[in-house]
Amino acid sequence: MSADEAWEDARNAALLTDLYELTMMQAYHREGLHDTAVFDLFFRKLPPHRSYLLAAGLESVLAYLEGLRFGDQALAYLDSLDRFTTGFLDYLADFRFTGEVRAVPEGTPVFANEPVVEVAAPLPQAQLVETFLLNQVHHQTLMASKGARVVDAAGDAAVVDFGARRMHGVDASLKAARAFHIAGAAATSNVLAGQVYGLPVSGTMAHSYIEAHADETAAFEAFAACYPETVLLVDTYDTLAGVRRVADLGRRLGKDFRVRAIRLDSGDLGELARRSRAILDEAGLQQVGIFASGSLDEYAIADLRAAGAPIDGYGVGTHMGVSEDAPYLDSAYKLVEYAGEPRMKLATDKVTLPGRKQVFREADAAGYYCGDVVAGAGEEHAGPPLLETVMRDGRRLPGAAPALADVRARAGRERDRLRPALRAVEAGGAPYPVRVSEDLDRTARELRRSLGG
């Protein structure tokens, strides 16, 4: 397989699955188990220091399901494994996803043990898609949730995604940039993500540019001549001396000086920002902002803000790009109904709730969300239902894939309805209440007894 064919696309996405999904599919096919199965995708628990998660990844899921096919190369590869019968491979050759999907909209805060995506489809179809759906919803929700924390910590200051070079692969860097945008990031340094998703792109300069010139002053002059409204990196040698050189450049250029900001990338950012602000102000450059980067996360940014550091924007890379303090979510995709009958898992610490469900979200008099109810799909409770039908017969419904700007706006509105304690960097206080309805709890208890649990 050539390098270009190795990249995941519509030709080979069907193979982006675990082998046991395919071996189970063949067994289902052989046994004639093609009745409708319902699977829930959810998060069992929140990581430490997380009070909520921000749902993301649904757009990728729907695009994948609509285009899911086994091409000739995929079928030839499966045939070469000597695990699959000719009859089963013929079945895969005509494979299409024909099911229904219900999901919470992207940009919705979600909590532990709430269905985020529900898939209802013939059992082999619903089984096959498990790996891809978990991969995309897990990663993008993880990134959006981390990004939301960083954006909240930054307050009115802009956050720019700098993380592509240390993320776990190319797909991760693209999808993360989109998720960070949903969470409120102002821009990304990832140019391909800018093209693919229409994101604002932003960048300054590297230390290598400064080092390539005879001295720092020459580098600043040359770059500002090329990009008048640029951001100048001032810490290649001596940070405060670099700021003074920017101030001198401002004096020399006068009205032609249009540099927007300086960038601090190392050292005591709070102290350097304060001293840099004083130098710039003394030179009459109050309009020049201060942008900070360098191993930042929500904790460091919160500390800088609490100390009153005069920083106008943050470039956040590795710690946000890999969600360093919580690098994974306890995600699951579990069968909850087959052929119209509820199903559940009873394994220790991994018990699931049976049947199709709905989540209702209640608000208090002030408009803040105050609790969720996980109920059976046919129940009615106070508050709006969160799960919406977004795909039927394998096709997206109108409005199921809103514009990214609308998803971002929704995420902002929804997060504003969370109490401030839930959005704090240091999680504290009582967790957001999520309860199971009496009817659903009764169904679960009765099924558990019938299964000997």
Image (cartoon, rainbow, N blue to C red):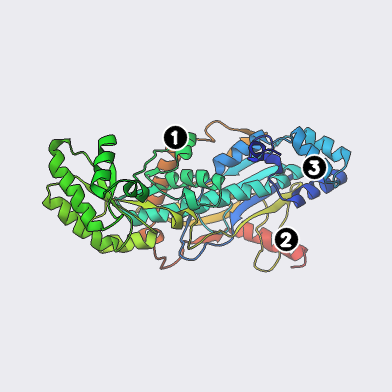
Task: Name the residue type under label 1.
Answer: Gly
Q: Which residue is mark 3?
A: 78
Question: Is residue 308 in view?
Answer: no
Badge nearest the viewer, 3 or 2: 3
Q: Which residue is mark 1?
A: 198
Q: Residues within 10 Å of mark 1 (few under 14, many from 20)?
A: few
Farthest residue in the top direction? 398
Q: Secondary structure at mark 1?
A: loop
Look at 70% across and 66% down and name the residue there.
347
Residue 240 to residue 119: above or below: below
Task: Name the residue type under label 3.
Answer: Leu
Q: Quadrant of the N terminus?
A: top right
Residue 270 to residue 316: above or below: below
Q: CA distance from mark 3 to mark 2?
A: 38 Å
Look at 85% across and 47% down and name the residue there.
83
Earlier along the polypeptide chain: callout 2 or callout 1? Answer: 1
Farthest residue in the front direction? 214
Residues tagged 2 and 1 counted as in contact (Cβ below 8 A)? no
Residue nearest the viewer, comparing 26 with 38: 26
Residue 257 to residue 338: above or below: above
Give residue 186's position: percent from left, percent from top. 36, 44
Q: Is residue 437 left or right of residue 276?
A: right
Q: Which residue is mark 2?
A: 447
